[in-house]
Image (cartoon, rainbow, N blue to C red):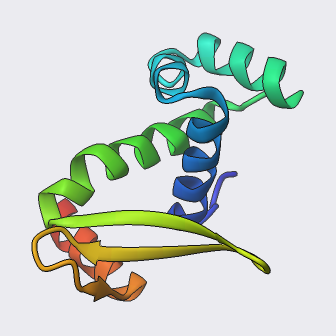
Amino acid sequence: MPGTPEEDLLEWLEREEERLGFTSIDDALDDITKARDLLYEELGYDITEEQFTGLQHALKTRYEDFPAIGVEMKRFEQPWGYQTIYRDILSKQFISGESVRAALEILRG
């Protein structure tokens, strides 16, 4: 996961929230021990410190940064896999991933 693009982490986060529930993921990402227990129990995967930090960052992006820039992210299942879209919260217009990344860079300084 180190070096994993943020979009991939956000997609992973959403899949796990759907599978395990929002509360389980939120609670687990507060403490690395809880995260390790949850991910090992559910996926047989032992998370590293760097991966834990990346997932915390993805959680902050979804619940703090996206609302701050007025963007919502949705993922839809298609016959060929999943499609991620970004929309402006107010106008509901679609926004490119590139525009979202640029807005996040500005927000984060």
Q: What's the residue at 57%, 68% (across, down)? A: 76
Q: What's the residue at 44%, 64% (across, down)? A: 74
User: Which residue is more in the foreground, 20 or 49?
Assistant: 20
Image x and y of residue 3, in percent: 63, 61
User: Which residue is more in the foreground, 15 or 50?
Assistant: 15
Image x and y of residue 58, in percent: 45, 48
For the C terminus, the quadrant is bottom left
* Residue 8 visible within the image: yes
Residue 12 in the figure: left or right of residue 108 = right
Image x and y of residue 41, in percent: 82, 17
Of all residues shown, which one is farthest toward the right?
44
Residue 57 in the figure: left or right of residue 16 = left
Q: Is residue 74 above or below residue 41?
A: below
Q: What's the residue at 77%, 78% (across, down)? A: 79
Q: What's the residue at 67%, 35% (across, down)? A: 19
Q: How many marks?
A: 0
Image x and y of residue 23, in percent: 46, 21
Q: Is residue 97 above or below residue 57?
A: below
Residue 32 in the figure: left or right of residue 108 = right
* Residue 45 visible within the image: no
Q: Is residue 25 above or below residue 99?
A: above
